[in-house]
Image (cartoon, grey):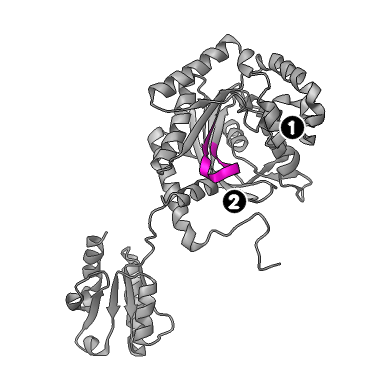
Amino acid sequence: MLTSVPRGTKDILPSEVGAWRYVEGVLRDLCRCFGFKEIRTPVFEHTELFQRGIGDTTDVVEKEMYTFIDRGNRSITLRPENTASAVRSFIEHKMYADPDPAKLFYIGPMFRYDRPQAGRQRQFHQFGVELLGAAGPNADAEIILLAVQILRKLGLKDLQLKINTVGCPECRPAYREKLQDYYRPHLAELCEDCRSRFDRNPMRILDCKNEKCHALAAGAPKLAECLDEACKEHFAKVQELLTASGVEFTVDPTLVRGLDYYTRTAFEIQYTPLGAQSAVLGGGRYDGLVEEVGGPATPGIGFAMGMERVILALQSQNLLPEKDDGIDVFAIAPKAEAAALAFTTVEQLREVGICAAYDYQQRSMKAQMKAANRLNAKFVLIFGEDELSRGMVTLRDMQTEDKDNSQREIPVADITTILKTEVQKNE
Protein backbone atom coordinates (compact mmCIF):
# COMPACT_ATOMS: atom_id res chain seq x y z
CA MET A 1 0.00 0.00 0.00
CA LEU A 2 1.29 3.42 -0.95
CA THR A 3 -0.10 4.93 2.25
CA SER A 4 1.80 2.56 4.57
CA VAL A 5 5.51 2.46 5.37
CA PRO A 6 7.35 -0.73 4.34
CA ARG A 7 7.38 -3.45 7.00
CA GLY A 8 10.22 -2.93 9.43
CA THR A 9 10.36 0.85 9.04
CA LYS A 10 8.77 3.54 11.14
CA ASP A 11 8.00 7.24 10.92
CA ILE A 12 9.46 9.29 13.74
CA LEU A 13 6.67 11.81 14.22
CA PRO A 14 7.06 15.45 15.32
CA SER A 15 5.73 14.50 18.78
CA GLU A 16 8.54 11.92 19.11
CA VAL A 17 11.47 13.83 17.65
CA GLY A 18 12.08 15.77 20.87
CA ALA A 19 13.09 12.54 22.64
CA TRP A 20 15.57 11.77 19.86
CA ARG A 21 17.04 15.28 20.00
CA TYR A 22 17.43 14.98 23.77
CA VAL A 23 19.30 11.66 23.55
CA GLU A 24 21.44 12.88 20.65
CA GLY A 25 22.33 15.99 22.68
CA VAL A 26 23.56 13.88 25.59
CA LEU A 27 25.60 11.72 23.20
CA ARG A 28 27.23 14.70 21.50
CA ASP A 29 28.07 16.40 24.80
CA LEU A 30 29.77 13.33 26.24
CA CYS A 31 31.64 12.59 23.00
CA ARG A 32 32.98 16.15 23.09
CA CYS A 33 34.15 15.63 26.69
CA PHE A 34 35.94 12.42 25.70
CA GLY A 35 37.50 14.03 22.60
CA PHE A 36 35.51 12.15 19.92
CA LYS A 37 34.60 13.93 16.68
CA GLU A 38 31.64 13.19 14.43
CA ILE A 39 31.98 11.37 11.11
CA ARG A 40 29.18 10.96 8.55
CA THR A 41 29.60 8.14 6.04
CA PRO A 42 27.38 7.20 3.05
CA VAL A 43 24.36 5.02 3.76
CA PHE A 44 25.51 2.58 1.07
CA GLU A 45 28.91 1.10 0.30
CA HIS A 46 30.44 -1.51 -1.98
CA THR A 47 29.18 -4.90 -0.82
CA GLU A 48 32.70 -6.29 -0.53
CA LEU A 49 33.45 -3.87 2.31
CA PHE A 50 30.92 -5.58 4.56
CA GLN A 51 31.78 -9.08 3.34
CA ARG A 52 35.42 -8.53 4.28
CA GLY A 53 34.85 -6.26 7.25
CA ILE A 54 31.98 -8.04 9.04
CA GLY A 55 32.74 -11.60 7.93
CA ASP A 56 30.99 -13.74 5.35
CA THR A 57 29.97 -16.35 7.95
CA THR A 58 27.92 -13.91 10.00
CA ASP A 59 24.13 -13.74 9.97
CA VAL A 60 24.39 -10.09 8.93
CA VAL A 61 26.21 -10.89 5.69
CA GLU A 62 24.51 -14.22 4.97
CA LYS A 63 20.90 -13.24 5.66
CA GLU A 64 20.30 -9.62 6.60
CA MET A 65 21.97 -7.24 4.15
CA TYR A 66 20.04 -5.12 1.66
CA THR A 67 22.15 -5.67 -1.46
CA PHE A 68 21.45 -4.66 -5.04
CA ILE A 69 23.20 -4.21 -8.39
CA ASP A 70 23.33 -0.59 -9.49
CA ARG A 71 23.20 0.73 -13.06
CA GLY A 72 26.97 0.42 -13.32
CA ASN A 73 26.68 -3.32 -12.56
CA ARG A 74 28.28 -2.80 -9.13
CA SER A 75 27.11 -4.68 -6.04
CA ILE A 76 25.99 -2.09 -3.49
CA THR A 77 24.76 -2.65 0.08
CA LEU A 78 22.87 -0.38 2.45
CA ARG A 79 25.10 -0.23 5.51
CA PRO A 80 24.06 -2.82 8.14
CA GLU A 81 26.49 -1.27 10.66
CA ASN A 82 28.96 1.60 10.60
CA THR A 83 32.29 0.30 11.91
CA ALA A 84 33.35 -1.02 8.50
CA SER A 85 32.38 2.29 6.88
CA ALA A 86 34.30 4.30 9.50
CA VAL A 87 37.35 2.09 8.95
CA ARG A 88 37.05 2.49 5.18
CA SER A 89 37.01 6.27 5.64
CA PHE A 90 39.96 6.05 8.07
CA ILE A 91 41.98 4.30 5.37
CA GLU A 92 40.78 6.31 2.38
CA HIS A 93 41.55 9.65 4.02
CA LYS A 94 44.84 8.44 5.54
CA MET A 95 43.83 9.28 9.10
CA TYR A 96 46.42 6.69 10.17
CA ALA A 97 49.11 9.23 9.24
CA ASP A 98 48.03 11.54 12.08
CA PRO A 99 50.21 11.32 15.21
CA ASP A 100 47.24 10.79 17.54
CA PRO A 101 44.64 8.01 17.50
CA ALA A 102 41.47 8.75 15.53
CA LYS A 103 38.47 9.17 17.85
CA LEU A 104 35.26 9.09 15.81
CA PHE A 105 31.55 8.91 16.55
CA TYR A 106 28.46 8.64 14.35
CA ILE A 107 24.68 8.72 14.59
CA GLY A 108 22.55 7.48 11.71
CA PRO A 109 20.30 4.89 10.07
CA MET A 110 21.39 1.29 9.41
CA PHE A 111 19.56 -1.42 7.46
CA ARG A 112 19.10 -5.13 8.14
CA TYR A 113 16.48 -7.51 6.81
CA ASP A 114 15.38 -8.95 10.14
CA ARG A 115 12.14 -9.87 11.87
CA PRO A 116 10.69 -6.57 13.19
CA GLN A 117 10.03 -6.41 16.92
CA ALA A 118 10.01 -3.87 19.75
CA GLY A 119 13.05 -1.64 19.42
CA ARG A 120 14.30 -3.55 16.38
CA GLN A 121 13.36 -2.43 12.88
CA ARG A 122 14.74 -3.11 9.40
CA GLN A 123 15.74 0.51 9.23
CA PHE A 124 17.12 1.30 12.66
CA HIS A 125 19.40 3.96 14.10
CA GLN A 126 22.74 3.52 15.76
CA PHE A 127 25.10 5.70 17.71
CA GLY A 128 28.64 4.42 17.80
CA VAL A 129 32.23 5.33 18.56
CA GLU A 130 35.48 4.07 17.10
CA LEU A 131 38.97 4.57 18.61
CA LEU A 132 41.58 3.68 15.98
CA GLY A 133 45.29 3.59 16.74
CA ALA A 134 45.40 2.67 20.46
CA ALA A 135 46.28 -0.90 21.47
CA GLY A 136 46.46 -0.75 25.25
CA PRO A 137 43.90 -1.97 27.78
CA ASN A 138 43.44 1.65 28.87
CA ALA A 139 41.75 2.32 25.51
CA ASP A 140 39.39 -0.60 26.14
CA ALA A 141 38.55 0.70 29.60
CA GLU A 142 37.98 4.25 28.30
CA ILE A 143 35.57 3.06 25.62
CA ILE A 144 33.62 0.99 28.17
CA LEU A 145 33.58 3.94 30.58
CA LEU A 146 32.19 6.20 27.86
CA ALA A 147 29.42 3.66 27.22
CA VAL A 148 28.62 3.44 30.94
CA GLN A 149 28.68 7.22 31.39
CA ILE A 150 26.27 7.72 28.48
CA LEU A 151 23.69 5.38 29.99
CA ARG A 152 24.22 6.85 33.46
CA LYS A 153 23.84 10.38 32.11
CA LEU A 154 20.55 9.35 30.53
CA GLY A 155 19.48 8.09 33.94
CA LEU A 156 19.05 4.41 33.06
CA LYS A 157 19.06 1.91 35.90
CA ASP A 158 18.83 -1.91 36.05
CA LEU A 159 21.79 -2.17 33.68
CA GLN A 160 24.19 -5.10 33.42
CA LEU A 161 27.69 -4.74 31.95
CA LYS A 162 29.07 -8.03 30.68
CA ILE A 163 32.64 -8.38 29.44
CA ASN A 164 34.73 -11.16 27.98
CA THR A 165 37.87 -11.74 25.99
CA VAL A 166 37.63 -13.49 22.63
CA GLY A 167 41.39 -13.87 22.40
CA CYS A 168 43.45 -13.23 19.29
CA PRO A 169 44.38 -15.09 16.09
CA GLU A 170 47.17 -16.87 18.01
CA CYS A 171 44.78 -18.15 20.74
CA ARG A 172 41.76 -19.08 18.73
CA PRO A 173 42.97 -22.07 16.63
CA ALA A 174 43.44 -24.20 19.77
CA TYR A 175 40.08 -23.02 21.12
CA ARG A 176 38.41 -23.74 17.80
CA GLU A 177 39.56 -27.37 18.03
CA LYS A 178 38.25 -27.67 21.60
CA LEU A 179 34.87 -26.26 20.60
CA GLN A 180 34.56 -28.62 17.65
CA ASP A 181 35.49 -31.59 19.86
CA TYR A 182 32.77 -30.52 22.31
CA TYR A 183 30.03 -29.90 19.76
CA ARG A 184 30.76 -32.83 17.43
CA PRO A 185 28.66 -35.35 19.43
CA HIS A 186 25.84 -32.75 19.60
CA LEU A 187 25.68 -31.77 15.93
CA ALA A 188 22.21 -33.23 15.47
CA GLU A 189 20.94 -31.12 18.37
CA LEU A 190 22.18 -27.84 16.91
CA CYS A 191 20.01 -25.58 14.78
CA GLU A 192 20.63 -25.51 11.04
CA ASP A 193 22.61 -22.26 11.25
CA CYS A 194 24.91 -23.60 13.95
CA ARG A 195 25.55 -26.83 12.05
CA SER A 196 26.82 -24.67 9.18
CA ARG A 197 28.94 -22.65 11.62
CA PHE A 198 30.57 -25.79 13.03
CA ASP A 199 33.25 -25.95 10.32
CA ARG A 200 33.46 -22.29 9.36
CA ASN A 201 33.34 -20.46 12.70
CA PRO A 202 32.39 -22.59 15.72
CA MET A 203 32.74 -19.64 18.13
CA ARG A 204 29.59 -18.19 16.59
CA ILE A 205 27.62 -21.12 18.01
CA LEU A 206 28.12 -19.58 21.47
CA ASP A 207 26.24 -16.49 20.28
CA CYS A 208 23.17 -18.40 19.05
CA LYS A 209 19.84 -17.48 20.65
CA ASN A 210 18.21 -20.83 19.80
CA GLU A 211 17.07 -22.38 23.09
CA LYS A 212 18.84 -25.72 22.57
CA CYS A 213 22.04 -24.15 21.25
CA HIS A 214 22.05 -21.68 24.13
CA ALA A 215 21.72 -24.52 26.65
CA LEU A 216 24.58 -26.47 25.04
CA ALA A 217 26.79 -23.36 25.12
CA ALA A 218 26.67 -23.37 28.92
CA GLY A 219 28.80 -26.52 29.01
CA ALA A 220 31.18 -25.55 26.21
CA PRO A 221 34.92 -25.12 26.87
CA LYS A 222 35.93 -21.65 28.00
CA LEU A 223 38.24 -19.53 25.90
CA ALA A 224 40.12 -18.57 29.09
CA GLU A 225 41.62 -22.07 29.01
CA CYS A 226 43.36 -21.28 25.71
CA LEU A 227 44.43 -17.65 26.12
CA ASP A 228 48.08 -16.78 25.66
CA GLU A 229 49.84 -14.70 28.30
CA ALA A 230 49.48 -11.41 26.38
CA CYS A 231 45.70 -11.80 26.09
CA LYS A 232 45.38 -12.84 29.74
CA GLU A 233 47.38 -9.82 30.85
CA HIS A 234 45.41 -7.47 28.60
CA PHE A 235 42.04 -8.67 29.93
CA ALA A 236 43.22 -8.59 33.54
CA LYS A 237 44.33 -4.97 33.12
CA VAL A 238 40.98 -3.98 31.58
CA GLN A 239 39.20 -5.46 34.62
CA GLU A 240 41.62 -3.73 36.98
CA LEU A 241 40.97 -0.32 35.37
CA LEU A 242 37.20 -0.79 35.41
CA THR A 243 37.27 -1.80 39.06
CA ALA A 244 39.45 1.20 39.91
CA SER A 245 36.85 3.42 38.20
CA GLY A 246 34.02 1.97 40.28
CA VAL A 247 32.32 0.18 37.39
CA GLU A 248 30.55 -3.07 38.20
CA PHE A 249 30.72 -5.85 35.61
CA THR A 250 30.29 -9.57 35.08
CA VAL A 251 32.69 -11.74 33.11
CA ASP A 252 30.54 -13.78 30.71
CA PRO A 253 32.57 -16.53 28.93
CA THR A 254 29.78 -17.04 26.34
CA LEU A 255 29.86 -13.41 25.16
CA VAL A 256 31.48 -13.48 21.72
CA ARG A 257 29.57 -10.75 19.83
CA GLY A 258 27.97 -11.37 16.44
CA LEU A 259 30.64 -10.06 14.05
CA ASP A 260 33.88 -11.73 13.00
CA TYR A 261 36.18 -8.76 13.43
CA TYR A 262 36.34 -8.76 17.24
CA THR A 263 39.58 -9.62 19.08
CA ARG A 264 40.36 -9.64 22.78
CA THR A 265 37.90 -7.45 24.73
CA ALA A 266 34.18 -7.81 23.97
CA PHE A 267 31.42 -6.22 26.02
CA GLU A 268 27.68 -5.69 26.14
CA ILE A 269 25.34 -3.63 28.31
CA GLN A 270 21.86 -5.01 28.86
CA TYR A 271 18.71 -3.37 30.17
CA THR A 272 16.86 -6.38 31.56
CA PRO A 273 13.28 -4.96 31.52
CA LEU A 274 13.40 -5.03 27.69
CA GLY A 275 13.17 -8.81 27.84
CA ALA A 276 14.59 -11.01 25.09
CA GLN A 277 16.05 -8.03 23.21
CA SER A 278 17.72 -6.57 26.30
CA ALA A 279 21.06 -5.54 24.80
CA VAL A 280 21.13 -1.78 24.27
CA LEU A 281 24.85 -1.41 23.57
CA GLY A 282 27.73 -3.65 22.59
CA GLY A 283 31.21 -3.56 21.19
CA GLY A 284 34.79 -4.59 21.58
CA ARG A 285 38.29 -4.60 20.16
CA TYR A 286 38.97 -5.31 16.48
CA ASP A 287 42.74 -5.13 15.93
CA GLY A 288 42.72 -6.89 12.56
CA LEU A 289 39.90 -5.02 10.86
CA VAL A 290 41.80 -2.08 9.34
CA GLU A 291 44.30 -4.46 7.77
CA GLU A 292 41.51 -6.77 6.55
CA VAL A 293 39.82 -3.87 4.77
CA GLY A 294 43.07 -2.85 3.06
CA GLY A 295 44.85 -0.46 5.41
CA PRO A 296 47.98 -0.70 7.54
CA ALA A 297 47.92 -2.82 10.69
CA THR A 298 46.07 -0.59 13.17
CA PRO A 299 44.46 -1.50 16.49
CA GLY A 300 40.87 -0.44 17.06
CA ILE A 301 38.04 -0.61 19.56
CA GLY A 302 34.49 0.74 19.60
CA PHE A 303 30.84 0.13 20.36
CA ALA A 304 27.41 0.76 18.88
CA MET A 305 24.16 1.60 20.65
CA GLY A 306 20.66 1.01 19.34
CA MET A 307 18.83 4.33 19.52
CA GLU A 308 15.34 2.80 19.36
CA ARG A 309 16.06 0.42 22.23
CA VAL A 310 17.56 3.13 24.41
CA ILE A 311 14.56 5.40 23.84
CA LEU A 312 12.23 2.50 24.72
CA ALA A 313 14.21 1.98 27.92
CA LEU A 314 14.03 5.69 28.78
CA GLN A 315 10.28 5.70 28.17
CA SER A 316 9.79 2.68 30.42
CA GLN A 317 11.56 4.48 33.30
CA ASN A 318 9.92 7.87 32.59
CA LEU A 319 13.32 9.42 32.00
CA LEU A 320 12.54 11.47 28.91
CA PRO A 321 12.15 15.22 29.55
CA GLU A 322 8.73 16.78 29.37
CA LYS A 323 7.88 18.13 25.95
CA ASP A 324 8.70 21.80 25.54
CA ASP A 325 7.70 22.47 21.97
CA GLY A 326 5.63 25.59 22.53
CA ILE A 327 6.14 28.81 20.62
CA ASP A 328 7.00 32.21 22.06
CA VAL A 329 4.33 34.38 20.45
CA PHE A 330 1.05 33.93 18.57
CA ALA A 331 -0.26 36.95 16.65
CA ILE A 332 -4.06 37.37 16.47
CA ALA A 333 -5.74 39.67 13.97
CA PRO A 334 -9.51 39.79 14.73
CA LYS A 335 -10.17 41.86 11.60
CA ALA A 336 -8.89 41.15 8.11
CA GLU A 337 -7.51 44.70 7.85
CA ALA A 338 -4.87 43.91 10.50
CA ALA A 339 -3.76 40.59 8.99
CA ALA A 340 -0.95 42.12 6.91
CA LEU A 341 0.50 43.90 9.96
CA ALA A 342 0.28 40.70 12.02
CA PHE A 343 2.05 38.82 9.22
CA THR A 344 4.94 41.30 8.92
CA THR A 345 5.29 41.51 12.72
CA VAL A 346 5.62 37.73 12.96
CA GLU A 347 8.37 37.80 10.33
CA GLN A 348 10.22 40.57 12.20
CA LEU A 349 10.06 38.57 15.43
CA ARG A 350 11.41 35.46 13.72
CA GLU A 351 14.34 37.46 12.34
CA VAL A 352 15.52 38.17 15.90
CA GLY A 353 15.13 34.55 17.03
CA ILE A 354 11.65 34.69 18.57
CA CYS A 355 9.46 31.71 17.68
CA ALA A 356 6.26 33.23 16.34
CA ALA A 357 3.13 32.12 14.46
CA TYR A 358 -0.22 33.50 13.29
CA ASP A 359 -3.53 32.21 11.99
CA TYR A 360 -3.46 31.42 8.27
CA GLN A 361 -7.24 31.28 7.94
CA GLN A 362 -8.23 34.56 9.65
CA ARG A 363 -10.77 32.80 11.85
CA SER A 364 -12.71 34.32 14.72
CA MET A 365 -10.96 35.74 17.78
CA LYS A 366 -12.11 32.73 19.83
CA ALA A 367 -10.78 30.23 17.25
CA GLN A 368 -7.44 32.04 17.07
CA MET A 369 -7.08 31.97 20.87
CA LYS A 370 -7.73 28.23 20.79
CA ALA A 371 -5.00 27.89 18.17
CA ALA A 372 -2.60 29.82 20.42
CA ASN A 373 -3.37 27.44 23.28
CA ARG A 374 -2.87 24.37 21.11
CA LEU A 375 0.56 25.72 20.14
CA ASN A 376 1.36 26.35 23.82
CA ALA A 377 2.16 30.00 23.09
CA LYS A 378 3.83 31.90 25.91
CA PHE A 379 2.46 35.25 24.71
CA VAL A 380 -0.34 36.43 22.47
CA LEU A 381 -0.30 39.66 20.46
CA ILE A 382 -3.80 40.96 19.68
CA PHE A 383 -4.03 43.43 16.79
CA GLY A 384 -7.38 44.91 17.80
CA GLU A 385 -8.99 47.66 15.74
CA ASP A 386 -9.32 50.10 18.65
CA GLU A 387 -5.74 49.60 19.88
CA LEU A 388 -4.28 49.95 16.38
CA SER A 389 -6.06 53.29 15.93
CA ARG A 390 -3.84 54.48 18.79
CA GLY A 391 -0.67 52.80 17.50
CA MET A 392 -0.90 50.05 20.13
CA VAL A 393 -1.46 46.28 20.37
CA THR A 394 -2.43 44.08 23.32
CA LEU A 395 0.23 41.78 24.76
CA ARG A 396 -1.21 38.90 26.81
CA ASP A 397 0.98 36.72 29.02
CA MET A 398 -0.40 33.19 28.74
CA GLN A 399 1.78 31.81 31.54
CA THR A 400 0.92 34.05 34.45
CA GLU A 401 -1.54 32.92 37.12
CA ASP A 402 -2.47 36.55 37.85
CA LYS A 403 -5.28 36.85 35.31
CA ASP A 404 -6.11 40.43 36.38
CA ASN A 405 -2.67 41.59 35.27
CA SER A 406 -2.09 39.20 32.41
CA GLN A 407 -2.28 41.74 29.59
CA ARG A 408 -1.27 45.25 28.72
CA GLU A 409 -1.04 47.51 25.71
CA ILE A 410 2.33 48.13 24.09
CA PRO A 411 3.34 50.39 21.15
CA VAL A 412 3.44 48.74 17.73
CA ALA A 413 6.86 50.32 17.19
CA ASP A 414 8.26 48.58 20.32
CA ILE A 415 6.85 45.07 19.82
CA THR A 416 10.18 43.44 18.92
CA THR A 417 12.17 45.14 21.70
CA ILE A 418 9.60 44.37 24.40
CA LEU A 419 9.09 40.76 23.35
CA LYS A 420 12.84 40.08 23.22
CA THR A 421 13.00 41.12 26.88
CA GLU A 422 9.90 39.17 27.89
CA VAL A 423 10.96 35.98 26.12
CA GLN A 424 14.45 36.14 27.66
CA LYS A 425 12.90 36.44 31.13
CA ASN A 426 11.08 33.14 30.60
CA GLU A 427 14.03 31.14 29.30
Relative height, residue 315 to residue 288 (above, below)? below
Badge 2 is on which residue? 118
Tag in front: 1 or 2: 2
Q: Is residue 280 visible?
A: yes
- The answer to whether residue 274 is magenta is yes
Secondary element type, mark 1:
loop
Secondary element type, mark 2:
loop
How many dots with numbers? 2
271 displayed left or right of 117: left
* Image quarter of the C terminus: bottom left
Badge 1 is on which residue? 57
Q: Which amino acid does label 1 sit on?
A: Thr
Q: What residue type is labelled 2?
A: Ala
Q: Is the residue marked by circle 2 packed among few (<14), some (14-19), or many (20+) residues within 10 Å?
A: few
Q: Can residue 265 be seen in this view?
A: no
The disc, 1 or 2, on the residue closer to the chain's N-terminal end is: 1
- The answer to whether residue 251 is magenta is no
Residue ID at (68%, 59%): 6
Picture quadrant where residue 55 is located: top right
- x and y percentages locating residue 221 in the rendered image: 67, 18
Picture quadrant where residue 153 is located: top left
- x and y percentages locating residue 160 in the rendered image: 49, 34
Magenta part of the chain: 268-281
